[in-house]
Structure formats: C-alpha cells, structure tokens
Image: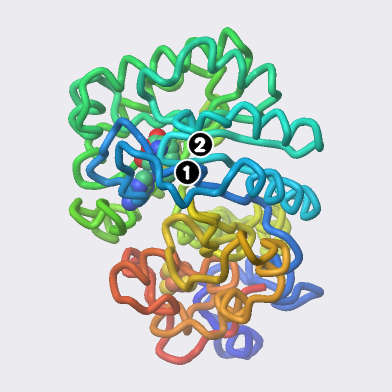
Amino acid sequence: MPVRQTAAACRSRETRTRFEDPAQMPEYSTGTTRETYVYGRAPRNVYWEVTVACDLACRHCRAEAVAERDPDELSTEQGRSLIDDVKTMGSLLVITGGDPMKRPDLFELMAYARSVGQPVAITPSTTPTLTREAVRKFAELGVVTMGVSLDGPSAAVHDAFRGVEGTYAVSQRALAWAREAEIPVQVNTTVCRQTLPHVRELMELLRGQAPPVIRWSLFILIPTGRGSMLESLTASELEELFSWVLAMSHDAPFHMSTVEAPHYRRYWIQSKLRTGMPWTAVREASKRMGFGMRDGNGVIFVARNGDVFPAGFLPYPLLGNVKRDQLSVLYRTSPALLGLRDMDLLTGKCGRCEFRWLCGGSRARAYATSGNVLGPEPMCVYQPGEAVQEPLL
Ligand SMILES: C[S@@+](CC[C@H](N)C(=O)[O-])C[C@H]1O[C@@H](n2cnc3c(N)ncnc32)[C@H](O)[C@@H]1O
Ligand code: SF4
C-alpha cells in the first residue's frame, strides 16, 4: 500500500518503484498541516448528560444509569449558563443521559436554547417516558435530530440486549412519531459480540424507515461503565464490518457512520487510494468529512454534575467543572486537552502510524483497555512500519 511509506521514503526513487501506479502516490504536505485536523477553537458537538436517571439499566451502559436522579445535577440556572457558553462557541448541543426525559425542566431548558438560537439534538431513552406528545414537543422546539437506540432488528434481539421487554416497541413507535412530526432521526446501534450477527438484518429494517432515519451510527462497544462486562469484536471482525459499512454506504438511504472507531477513516482512505482516487482528492474529502475529530478534539462532554471530560466514553482526564469553570475556556486552554490533541504524543503503533492525525485510534478504548489514554488502539488490524512514519496530512 502506498500509504504505508514514509514521506521521505516516498520521495526516494527506490521506493517509488514499489508503487503499483505512481500516479496514485500521495503528495504529502502540500499546504496541509497538522492544525487542519485540530479543532482547537471550538468543539463541533457538546454532549451534555443532563441526568443519569433512566428506567432502563442496559448491560452496556457507559453512564451506569440508575433509576434516581443525582442530587448533584446541574440546576436549571447552571444549565442556562452552560447553554449560553455553548452558544458562544457555535457548537451543536447534544442533550443526552441517562434519559433526558427524567429531568422535569427539560423542555424549559430546550426552550431557552431555542430562544438564544442554540441548536439542540436529543437522545431520549426508549421507555414509556418517550411519548408522542414529547416527540411533538421536540419538533415544536426545533430539535435538529433525535437519537433513537436500536440494537437489533427485532424485539427478541433488542429487548434481550436492553434487558427490558417492550423497548423495541417503543423505539418503533418513536420512529413513527418522528416521521409524523418530521424530526430527522439518528439511529444508534451498539456493536459488540451479542449484536454483530444482527447488523445486516437491521440495515434492511432501517432501509424502510428512511425518512425519518437520516443517519445510522454504529457505536463500537467501549468497555467502560457497565460496558466492561460485555464482549467486544476482534480487530479483524471490526475490519470486516468496515468493509461492509463502506459497501453498504454507497446506496444506503441514510448516512452511515461509526462511533469510537476512527480507524474506519484509515480503511476508507486505503480503499479510495486502491480505486485510484488521487491523494489530493482523498485529502480534500477527508477534511470535509471531519477526519481528525475525536474525543476531546471537536467533541467535549459535560457529565451530570458538571464535570467536563473529553467524551462520554472517555472519563479521563477530568478537565474541570462547569459549576466553576467556563466550558469554552476549558476546551481551548486545558493543558490535558491540548496534549490529547497532539497525535505525535501517541505511543505504540498509533504513535508510529502515518494515519495518526486523521485517525488517531479511539482514545476511549485505549484508556478503557490499558489505562493509557495515549496508548495504541487495540481494535485496529493495521501495522505501521517499525519506525515513526511521516504523517499523512
Ligand atoms: C449514551 S446513549 C444515550 C441515550 C440513551 N440513554 C440510550 O441508551 O438510548 C447513546 C448511545 O450510546 C450507546 N452506548 C452506551 N454505552 C456504550 C458503550 N459502553 N459502548 C458503546 N456504545 C454505548 C447507547 O447504546 C446509545 O445507543
Ligand atoms: S494504527 Fe492507530 S492511528 Fe494507525 S490506523 Fe490503526 S488506529 Fe489509526
């Protein structure tokens, strides 16, 4: 593969002969710098876990959600200040949980966000708290998208995974209500050993549900929170899934994406180069598609009590708390975050890899599996060279 060569090696006559087609050779470093892949000024998405309360107790839940609200949750007033701050950054606010519907002031907060022109997405839990009226209210309040979790194509699979009978039925009703209310839906599916066999059938089910489904996000299990009790895929199984996602995405009636698997970008780039797409075009597309975005870089997470972390799946390091710190300041200046955005600090194979600035591996998975937030992504099959490779930029 051409992209496995270092820039220096690529320039050498000897290595050039190893390219099947010299026209495909990447033109490294022409006007693109590491900063292109750094979201230093503002995150694209701010995730706010408004509550940890939820009537489900899913076996994979990263939030370890429980039935009761945490008395330490942000107050309505603190929530308003957070919304004001997010507005100054121009980010999308994703209201998540637990189950956001468990907050009695949810609609009040959403109405406030609307009044200040702050775009909001929401990921309610699929329990009886999610009613037709609630979905209508989301529409009225102008939500950008509603997230609906669906981990399998049938009640048998989905309810077994979620541990509560009837959740599949609620998710199906939620999709119907979203269609009625004309709210775009992002379907979220957790992919692990238990759900992998059902992903293809789920695709067929979702095909018939677009609209309202506009995006299907495959959340590759992070063994954090209760998720540490479940079994992940192997790196080669994930690589096969990448190949299937790429093939399916060509005629899917919605956008398909992976969450916590930034090495899908490496797979995507390798595939495009293999088809003869010139590196300059691949690079332009990569920039457009936000390659480089990952936990703490383009994404930031505010926990139920105001604690700020790089992402919901990465509860380390603790960056501050919005009860006393401004999120926008933490995002721009926290030394720990600046370190997390420097892909030249990665260790192991990710640190040597030429894809590190576009991919960088899941920092959440590296942390969850080894305790080293800068360590190698354990679910990537790619083996870079033994020496540190010149990064693809
Ligand atoms: C954080 S949840 C929030 C919405 C709501 N509580 C729910 O579960 O539908 C958003 C998505 O993350 C997924 N998720 C939760 N824990 C996870 C984990 N440990 N690894 C991967 N995905 C996970 C959920 O299944 C859900 O689809
Ligand atoms: S080795 Fe790391 S940086 Fe390279 S493609 Fe795999 S996960 Fe990404």
**Residue 90 appears left or right of 191:** right
Q: Is mark 1 on a helix, strand or loop?
A: helix
Q: Label 2: few (<14), some or many (≥20) within 10 Å?
A: few
The single residue placed furthest to the top in the displayed view is 180
Q: Are marks 1 and 2 in contact (CB under 8 Å)?
A: yes
Q: From the viewer's side, name the closer residue of 173 and 34.
A: 173
Q: What element carries label 2?
A: helix
Residue identified by numbered label 1 = 246
Looking at the image, residue 202 lies above or below residue 212? below
Residue at 55% across, 17% down: 135
Residue at 47% across, 30% down: 124
Residue at 54% across, 57% down: 306
Q: What residue type is labelled 1?
A: Leu
Looking at the image, residue 288 lies above or below residue 210? below
**What is the spatial separation of the Cα atoms under label 1 and label 2, in whole angstroms?**
5 Å
Residue identified by numbered label 2 = 249
**Residue 229 appears left or right of 145:** left
Q: Residue 169 placed where, x, y %? A: 32, 15
